[in-house]
Amino acid sequence: MRPDDPTDEHWVDPEIIRPYVVTRGRTQPAHGKFDLISMAVAVGPPPGPDAGLDPEHHRILQLCREPKSVAEIAAHLDLPAGTIRVLLGDLFDRELVSAQEPQSEVDMHDMKMYRAVLDGLRSL
Amino acid sequence: MVFARSERPRLPTAIKILVAGGFGAGKTTLVGAVSETRPLRTEEVLTDRGIGVDDLTSVEAKRTTTVAMDFGRITLGTDYVLYLFGTPGQERFWFVWDELAEGALGAVILADTRRLADCFPSVDYFERRGTPFVVAVNCFEGATTFELDEVRMALQLDPSIPIVLCDARRRDSSREVLITLVKHSARLRAEPVGS
C-alpha cells in the first residue's frame, strides 16, 4: 500500500478530518468559553449567503432560533462539541448569537432554582 | 426602529444532572424515559486534571480522551432547562468525570443488583468530590430483589444518602428518582424546600 496512491482512500478517515476542516484547523474559539450546557440563541435577522459564513454557521443559527446548548448543537450537526465551540465563538464575535458563559452557571444555593426544578419535574 | 437590540431573547439557565452507573445499568434508558426527545449523543474531548483532584501541579500527567455521552433535555418553564448526561460507564474513563461534574446539581447512580460492584467507582467518586448523589436500584425483570438496606450496606452508603428502587424504563419512576435527587441536593446546599 503506497501512501501516494490516489486509489487508496483509507489513509485518512474523513470522520476525523471533518471537524478540523470545518474550523479551518482551529481548536479554540476566538471568544467565549462554552461548556457542554452553555446556551446559545440566534439574535437579529438571519445573515444572507454573502455574509462570509460557512454552511455549519448557518445551520447553527437555524437551530438556535430557540435556545440550544452546545451539546444539543453538536448532536444535531454530528460534530464534536469542541468544533461547535469554535463556530459559536465566530457567531458570538459577529453578534449573531447571544450566549451564556459558563461563569454565569447556576447558583447551587439558589432556593428559587430548586423550587422551579421540583415544580417542573412534578408537572412532567 | 426595526430591531430592538436590547430585547434579545432571554436565555434560560441550564442545569446539569449526571446519570452514572456501570455498563448496562440503564443510564441511557433513564435519560430517555424522562427527556422530551429521544436521547442525543455528543462527543467531548475531556482532559485529566492530573493524578488526584487537588494536585494541580502535575501538568505533565494530563491526558485527554474523547468520550461519547448520551444526554436528554427537559425544559422547565421559560427560566430553566435541565440536561441529563449519561456518564461513560467504563471505569477507565473515571478521570474525565471531574470536568462533567463541575457545576452539576447532582448525580443519580444507577445500580444493577446483578452487578452491584459496577457502581462502586461512581459512589466513591461522587463521595470524594462532594457532589450530591442518590442511588437508584434499577429493578430489571427477573433480577433478584435486594432489600434496599442490603444494597446500602454493600455500598457502605452514609445513612443520609437516599436510596430508592426504580424502573428506568418508566417515566414516572425515573421522574421520582430525579425529584429525590433535587430534594437531597437542596437539603445539602440550601434550606429545605418542603416535600
Image (tube, grey):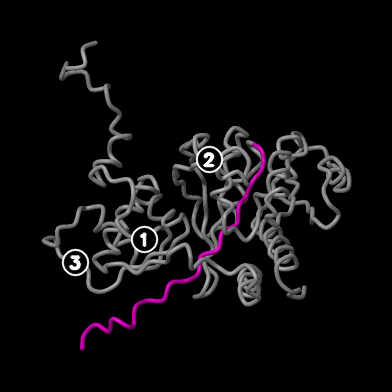
Which residue corresponds to the image point at 50% horizontal and 37% vertical from the top-left?
Answer: B62
- Give the crowd class for mark 3: few <14, some 14-19, many >=20 residues within 10 Å: few
Which residue corresponds to the image point at 84% horizontal and 46% vertical from the top-left?
Answer: B152
Screen quadrant of the C terminus of chain A: bottom right
The furthest residue to the bottom? B1
Q: Amino acid at mark 3?
A: Pro
The furthest residue to the top? A1
x, y percent for residue A113 = 61, 73
Q: Are marks 2 and 3 on the same chain?
A: no
x, y percent for residue A94 = 23, 66
B129 versus A6 height, above or below: below
Task: Read off the magenta span.
Answer: B1-22
- The residue beneath circle 3 is A47
x, y percent for residue B29 = 60, 47
Q: Amino acid at mark 1?
A: Gly
Q: Amino acid at mark 2?
A: Asp
Direction from residue B106 to residue A12 in the image, left or right: left
